């Protein structure tokens, strides 16, 4: 059975760490944070922190696949990151383009399927072109999925999904009462990916900063005290170890009812 996308269908079918330690089938999401502080500590411009961040992304994608993770979603640029100085914004846009230009051949060869999630409106035509070409070229790959959240904001994505549903109602192809959690999440830009099992944030900050607000409902959160440019497979392994120690309950209870509960239930 394929794993459900969200928590509303069959949460008990969600992936977990196998006894052998492999993270088969896991969806891991990462808020790659701390590029600026990494650079500042070295007396370097923030742009160099972002460049080193791309190297960390490369290492982490390779490490994730080797650890048996099947899907990785990384936060590359938020709808709020437009508030940064124009030079930094254009540096980040340039890095996305450069990453796909330099890495797409290898990603394609390695069986990686690339997806971009977030708002496409507002992105320059050349970025859209590179991104859409990368998606088309890797569409048939299925060993590993790399989702890059770019011009992504959890609130914006929820608003866009609400608008899409309102539009269906207006056109008479849906009724308000048709809306369910499952239908709503199918309208998010992250659909049809399953919800993340684990969300990691680097740099020590302990907030989501508008990342995967709907999808995080039952994700485990792990915060790591490492700036993103220093990140790599060993840190990912440590986050998975922590994840493996968590007990996911989805609002239910973990133990089968004991005899006493049965007696009480029977009255
Ligand atoms: C993360 O690093 C990269 C993006 C947000 C694009 P930051 O640039 O946020 O680095 P800090 O948080 O200022 O250290
Ligand atoms: C979140 O980090 C966005 C990305 C990592 C792309 P920010 O650095 O933008 O978040 P805040 O401003 O510290 O909350
Ligand atoms: Mg930051």
Image: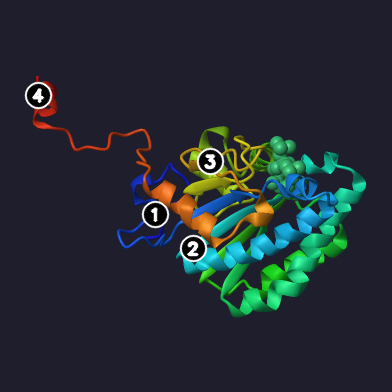
Residue lying at 85% horizontally and 55% vertically, measured from the top left: 91
Query: What label sits on residue 70 in the rendered view?
Result: 2
Judging by the rendered image, the residue that carries numbered circle 4 is: 266
Q: Is residue 122 visible?
A: no
Q: Is residue 52 left or right of residue 217?
A: right
Residue 19 appears at what percent x and percent y? 30, 59
Of badges 4 and 1, the one in the foreground is: 1
How far separated are the C-alphas under marks 4 and 3?
Answer: 37 Å
In what quadrant of the picture does the C terminus appear? Answer: top left
Q: Nearer the viewer, residue 82 or 172?
A: 82
- Asked if the residue at tag 2 contacts the one at tag 1, i.e. Cβ–Cβ closer than 8 Å, the answer is yes
Residue lying at 84% horizontally and 39% vertically, measured from the top left: 83
Badge 3 local density, few (<14 within 10 Å), some, or many (20+)? many
Q: Is residue 258 above or below residue 42?
A: above
Of badges 4 and 2, the one in the foreground is: 2
Badge 2 local density, few (<14 within 10 Å), some, or many (20+)? many
Farthest residue in the right direction? 86
- Asked if the residue at tag 2 contacts the one at tag 4, i.e. Cβ–Cβ closer than 8 Å, the answer is no
């Amino acid at each position: 059975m394929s794993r459900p996308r969200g928590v509303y269908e069959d949460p008990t079918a969600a992936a977990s760490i196998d006894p052998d330690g492999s993270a088969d089938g896991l969806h891991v999401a990462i808020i790659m944070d701390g590029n600026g502080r990494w650079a500042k500590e070295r007396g370097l411009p923030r742009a160099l922190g972002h460049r080193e961040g791309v190297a960390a992304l490369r290492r982490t994608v390779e490490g994730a696949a080797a650890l048996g993770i099947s899907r990785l979603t990384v936060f590359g640029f938020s709808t709020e990151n437009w508030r940064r100085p124009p030079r930094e914004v254009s540096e980040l846009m340039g890095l996305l383009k450069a990453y796909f230009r330099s890495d797409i051949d290898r990603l394609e060869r390695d069986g990686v399927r690339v997806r971009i999630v977030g708002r496409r409106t507002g992105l320059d035509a050349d970025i859209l072109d590179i991104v859409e070409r990368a998606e088309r070229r890797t569409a048939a790959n299925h060993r590993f999925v790399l989702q890059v959240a770019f011009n992504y904001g959890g609130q914006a994505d929820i608003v866009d999904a609400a608008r899409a549903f309102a539009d269906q109602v207006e056109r008479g192809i849906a009724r308000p009462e048709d809306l369910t959690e499952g239908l709503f999440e199918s309208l998010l830009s992250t659909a049809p990916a399953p919800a993340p099992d684990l969300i990691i944030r680097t740099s020590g900050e302990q907030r989501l900063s508008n990342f995967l607000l709907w999808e995080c409902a039952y994700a485990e959160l792990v915060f790591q005290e490492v700036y993103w440019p220093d990140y790599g497979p060993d840190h990912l392994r440590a986050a998975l170890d922590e994840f493996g120690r968590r007990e996911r309950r989805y609002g239910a209870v973990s133990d089968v009812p004991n005899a006493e509960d049965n007696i009480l239930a029977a009255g």
